[in-house]
Amino acid sequence: MKQMKRKLVTASCTLALSIAAITAQAADTIKVGVLHSLSGTMAISETTLKDTMLMLIEEQNKKGGLLGMQLEAVVVDPASDWPLFAERARELLERDKVAAIFGAWTSVSRKSVLPVVEELNGLLFYPVQYEGEESSRNVFYTGAAPNQQAIPAVDYLMNELGIERWVLAGTDYVYPRTTNRILEAYLKSHGVAEEDILINYTPFGHSDWQTIVSDIRSFGSAGKKTAVVSTINGDANVPFYRELGAQGVSAEDIPVIAFSVGEEELSGIDAAPLVGHLAAWNYFMSVDTEENDAFIDQWHAFIGNTDRVTNDPMEAHYIGFNMWVEAVNKAGTTDPSAVQEAIIGVTVPNLTGGYAAMMPNHHITKPVLIGEIQADGQFETVWRTPSTVVGDAWSDFLEGSKDIISDWRKPLECGNYNVVTKTCSGQTF
Amino acid sequence: MTSRIIRWLLASGVLLACLAVSAGIQAQTDDQVLLEVQALLVSPNAPDKTVAIERLAQADHPRALEIYALLLDSKLYFNRADDFLYVIDNVVEGAPALALLSQETSLIERRRDYRRVAINNAQRTQIRRVMAQTGLNHERMEVRVGAVQQLMGDLDQDALTLIREAYVSETHGRVRDLMAVALAIDTLTSGDEAAQRDAISVLGGSLEPRGRVALVRYVEATDQPRLKTLAEQALVGIDQQVRFYKGLETVFFGLSMGSVLVLAAIGLAITFGVMGVINMAHGELIMIGAYTTFVIQQLMPNHIGLSVLVAVPAAFIVSGLVGIAIERGVIRFLYGRPLETLLATFGVSLVLQQAVRSIFSPLNRSVQTPEWMSGMLHFNPVFAVTWNRLYIILFCLMVFFLLLLILKRTALGLQVRAVSQNRAMARAMGVRSERVDMMTFGLGSGVAGIAGVALSQLTNVGPNLGQAYIIDSFMVVVFGGVGNIWGTLVAGMTLGVANKLMEPWAGAVLAKILVLVFIILFIQKRPRGLFPQRGRAAEG
Amino acid sequence: MLWKLIREDRGGQILLAMLLLAIIAVPLLNGLPSDHPLHIPTYTVALLGKYLTLALLALSVDLVWGYLGILTLGHGAFFALGGYVMGMYLMRQIGERGVYGHPELPDFMVFLSYDSLPWYWLGFDSFWFTVIMVMLVPGVLAFVFGALAFRSRVSGVYLSIITQALTFALMLAFFRNEMGFGGNNGLTDFKDILGFSLQSRETRLGLFIASAVALMLGYLLSRYIIQSRLGRVCVAVRDAESRARFLGYRVENVKLWVFTLSAMMAGVAGALYVPQVGIINPNEFSPLNSIEVVVWVAVGGRATLYGAVVGALLINYAKTWFTTELPEVWLFALGAIFILVTLLLPRGVTGLLRRKEAV
């Protein structure tokens, strides 16, 4: 019995000690945290972004690093588990002392990380299109806000294709909910009647779309040109598009415009029945610029596979990383507060032949591209905004947020300043 | 369907082109048109392409149909260096590129040199309308139907004239009806009172959605009360029929969803129901079947239609072997401890998922739908069922009855039932129970693999495929009654139909929650499912 | 009196001693300067606190699985409900500091255009009301569910499957935004608890100590139950349900009370878990989570109580380690642990240390 006791004690002590153990820190590198799920349900999208970050860091090191130091990527796996995102972010900032974190994909993972980066004054570059209604001192939103994706897309459908009847179909979570509320308000302000808008929400991973596609077909047979605005997320898209194809809904009858379907998602679908359906993004792999060609070549060389595609969130990381590098150079230090100040106004080239600038609300300027799906799973750009669009953190079409602005420059330094009540609510630190 | 039309048009286009070239008619002017079209198609401006398409149609160019088909199939490219058009199947270095005008073949040196001539939806519609005009006299009925529908999208005088001409010589009932509707839609707005009355009765007897829309508009606009009443009556009649067919459609949707559930669950009905093994890796066996389909398609890329048929036995064997390996490696040590098998097989499922992720990458894989499974079976304009769902229902029933046959009519089936009812007694009678266990588990796993082939036609082929079906599968088996595969069939179909009946008013999520709550309550009422096993085996 | 509970329970003695030690040592070591080799950073404190709440959850599962023989695959539901109750309290504490600055409504409600708080959100501004609800909500659900299931003698595999259906249905329900619990994003961005900022070191230490104390109390309570007459009947029910019934015991009632109590323990665990991780989201209801808990118990050693705690700590520590160091290998490793433990260590890792004593 005594022997057992001793064993248990030793075992528990080793356990406790190894938790407490602090990894030795090398002072001659700048650490960059990469916080993307490598296992679990989100691995499908996020693994690519981890590889993108590794590629960008490797490239920067070849160019001589940053501030005379080499960059070192610290990759952790939050395993698609939302509390784990916060835990890992804390670990990156407290233990590894990373200079910036590039990561998160879903809204909920960002929401989970947010209090941690604010508490520890870290920097988070978030590369995915999202619902807006947020602006944090410590977060830089390099993906699209709703006004950089949804609104131009609807404009295109309304003006170029003459759409009069709308199906807003989405997965039941905050991004589609917000986008659809904004779109509903926007459409109504353009004279679309209540009965010409059909809103439908489905659960994550919804796989049986027969009823909904059939509803869309009957909704679309009322004699007015109809389109579907899809904020359907991830895994549910494949069965949705398959059902569309099977029920013969062609893009010429009822076009579907998606905000969450990119090149990578299409590479898992037989795209032939989808030709002509649309997507709105700020980048397409097919964009014909020298920067993009170079980026694609670099990606293929890094990943060792010329069949791999590039997509919009990858471009967002490309822009975000270059902006951070630029800002660190400008500030001469990786200190988060200095970088936060330096990065506003930083302008770097994007991959579509223009420039992206970091705005005072921590969103960036982006062109909006509408593309049609081709049989090989690529998009052909059929329309793009004449100039870049500034990301709007607080939508002008929502009752609660149209009076709120965000400006992180001195003297305002507030992410949600109400211009009517002249108060800055929320973040007090 | 469309691809068939295109192929025919392509063939006839090529034929025409050959004739034209050999006869040498107007070679000079044609080239002039083609040069012009080439310049327009190469332009980056979308409106130029619209002009090009129109130019081809106006000139009635012999190669017009060929070029249209190439544009629709997006096989037309231009070289950035010389701005010539090329026909390319697959843009990779070393592949041939056929110059459209000179018909000379060269090899692609850099794939970046070639850009696709992309057209947009409006241009696609434009092309299809031009093609529809020749399609009205096509020998195949489906092509003619498609042509009329295409023209009905925008009924201008040209289209009406074409339809009117074709109507005279048309013999097939369905095409005639459709043409009659198209003409009646026009008459409603242009004809005199008697003609309008006839048009209303024509439209009232048709379920064509466009006809209904025309009637609704007519009711809103007309100032003749008697005709208005007639039109309203016609609308009531149409709506009644539409409701009936919608109901029919819902039932079909339910059966099809049910058949997916049954397919996913039936393997489990054997391993769990008959053997009492809680196999949490069941979903991953389905996943393996789906990946097998993917691999088979990679191996035979030119025979997609056949590949799905080949995949069925292949998936059965692959999943079956994996199942046997699981049984030999893990489960056989745990017989009689069902809850422990649950944990161990859960571990197996994690390992299999991660293995697939490591081998095939975490990305979804694209499995193509063969031609014979795509498209719809039209009963009338408001009721049509998709071929893939129909095949899956039939496939599900086939698998079910085959399994029933194996369990009831073969020596293996007899032994399986014997072992599941009383292992000791069966062994005493000389049944090699170990071998039977192995074979049974292999059978159940193989059937799961077959389900994976079917699911690959409906949903994602990715590492999470299995997870999505495991809970549903257990619900179906438990609801039906463990140890009874008839129960599984009835339970799966019931749950499918119930889900679909509730979906229109409750929404997809609530419908699913209600079904789950119903199952929980049902199990309280009848703890052993719909068709409980009776006798001593049930107490085990 | 307390000593009597663990007099014959060596593992329990060690466990409680370790917990006591941790309660004293962790704050001390955390107070050391940060370059000291024995310093425990605050994030490790929060991590340890989280592990302890998960250990409490494992303990509650061991109580019903180890001693009642009910393989519950839905205990995560009670844990998550407790978490949601605490989350509601924490949301109410945010007050005007939300991004929209609404004095009463949480941000997501402002956003979904609620005019006023739904009735089921009332009262959660009071801490003591919340404490009661943390136990009451999971308890009532477990009672109703158990009353139905045990009275109609649903048992074994069937019971496992419907507990799974229960948590799955709850997960789908909480994902719905119409439910008024924040949908997929859940409840997050908490500011403070009982007036103490959640981000301060002291609050984190406090929560850690609270988790350790809760685990100790949970342990003693569980010991008390299994040592009492009720506990002996439990084991009788587990080993031969029909025989216990024929001897005149009201088997349903025994099961029902222990099951309900265990659910309340899981609820407390969830309530302590949420402020330490900072978010509660419907994913906590996912059936996979519940299955994982069962595996912790199996790994540690079923029907020993302290085994459940050891298993929970071990696996979670392994998870943290693997997902940091070898992310790709984590699922392989976890899967292998499941298989090997059930095949080779039916008595769990603590079984290796134990002599052949009667369980």
Image (spheres, coloured by chain):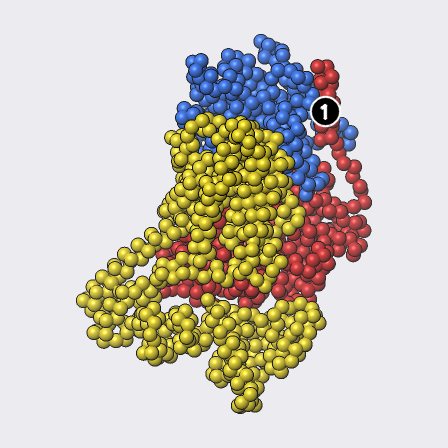
Chain colours: A red, B yellow, C blue
x and y percent of residue A76 in the render? 68, 42
* Number of numbered tags placed on the structure image: 1
Q: Is residue A334 left or right of residue C186?
A: right
Q: Mark 1: which secondary structure?
A: helix
x and y percent of residue A81 in the render? 59, 40
Q: In this view, does B514 lie to the left or right of B185?
A: right
The extreme left residue here reads B226
Q: In this view, does B530 lie to the left or right of B307?
A: left
Q: Residue at x 58, y 44 (%)?
A: B320
Q: Which residue is drawn at 54% across and 20% down?
A: C67
Q: Mark 1 points at which residue?
A: A11
Which quarter of the figure has residue A345? bottom right
Q: Residue at x 54, y 52 (%)?
A: B312
x and y percent of residue B506 in the render? 38, 45
Q: Can residue C277 be seen in this view?
A: no
For the residue pair A138 and B75, the one nearer the viewer reads as B75
| Mark 1 chain | A
Q: Is residue B531 left or right of residue B206?
A: right
Quadrant containing the N terminus of chain A in the rendered view: top right
Q: Which residue is drawn at 36% across and 56% down?
A: A195
Q: What residue type is labelled 1?
A: Ala
Q: Is residue A254 visible?
A: yes
Q: Does residue A124 lie above or below A253 as drawn?
A: above
Quadrant containing the C terminus of chain A in the rendered view: top right
For the residue pair C25 and B199, the one nearer the viewer reads as B199
Number of other residues with Cα within 10 Å of mark 1, as a class: few under 14, some 14 to 19, many 20 or more = few
For the residue pair A52 and A363, the one nearer the viewer reads as A52
Which quarter of the figure has residue A193? bottom left
